């Protein structure tokens, strides 16, 4: 699609043509847009993943979360381009770390200051730091629901109870 969207090639296949029109509609809603083709030599991880997916039969992938699409992903898909999703429990910590603002209540401000010492913002994403653990990505409510559902019911999921589910979410590096 990179070459088609940059008008180097023409979209001739009907399915590719549908993707082109949907992408073009999405692009027109942005003030600025740039797209760049990354050669396989410079994107080894994606290249290895595509080779692995094409060489093994379904069910043999033990280390990859895999989804088989039985129809094109054109229909019933909504692209959410809104960055201002409700931060929920992260709002006070985010505001303190990003803008330096604190709640007006003195006790609440002290709590936020103490709690935010354990967090860091990297590339506009909030992470929780630990002494002997890796950085854990902080999730909004909708993101957490998706991650829990994927870990619990996904292709590699097992229907585990609350304590083991919490441990599995932490091992997946989410908070």
Image: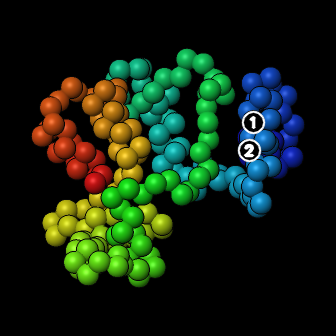
Camera-side residue of 36 and 42: 36
Vertical placement of residue 135 versus 19, above or below: below
Residue at 75% x, 55% y is 30
- For mark 1, give the secondary structure: helix
Q: Name the quarter where the N terminus is drawn.
A: top right
Asked if residue 75 lies left or right of residue 15, the reply is left
Q: Position of residue 66 (x, y in %)?
A: 42, 30
Asked if residue 119 lies left or right of residue 87, the reply is left
Residue at 28% x, 47% y is 172
Vertical placement of residue 88 versus 59, above or below: below
Q: Residues within 10 Å of mark 2 (few under 14, many from 20)?
A: few
Q: Are marks 2 and 1 in contact (CB under 8 Å)?
A: yes
Camera-side residue of 161 and 158: 161
Q: CA distance from mark 2 to mark 1?
A: 6 Å
Residue 155 seen by the camera: yes
- For mark 2, give the secondary structure: helix
* Marking on residue 26: 2
Q: Position of residue 41 (x, y in %)?
A: 59, 53
Image mark count: 2
Q: Position of residue 156 (x, y in %)?
A: 30, 29
Q: Which residue is mark 1?
A: 22
- When asked about the image quadrant of residue 152, the answer is top left
Residue at 12% x, 40% y is 163
Vertical placement of residue 32 versus 106, above or below: above
């Amino acid at each position: 699609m990179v070459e088609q969207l940059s008008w180097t090639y023409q979209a001739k296949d009907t399915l590719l043509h549908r993707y082109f029109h949907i992408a073009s509609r999405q692009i027109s809603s942005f003030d600025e847009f740039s797209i760049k083709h990354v050669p396989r030599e410079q994107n080894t991880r994606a290249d290895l993943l595509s080779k692995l997916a094409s060489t093994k039969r379904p069910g043999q992938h033990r280390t990859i979360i895999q989804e088989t699409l039985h129809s094109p992903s054109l229909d019933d898909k909504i692209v959410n381009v809104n960055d201002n999703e409700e931060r929920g429990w992260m709002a006070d910590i985010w505001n303190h770390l990003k803008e330096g603002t604190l709640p007006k209540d003195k006790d609440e401000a002290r709590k936020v200051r103490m709690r935010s010492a354990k967090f860091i913002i990297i590339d506009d994403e909030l992470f929780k730091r630990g002494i002997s653990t890796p950085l854990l990505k902080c999730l909004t409510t909708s993101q957490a629901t998706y991650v829990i559902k994927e870990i619990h019911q996904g292709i590699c999921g097992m229907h585990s109870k609350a304590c083991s589910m919490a441990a599995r979410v932490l091992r997946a590096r989410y908070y």
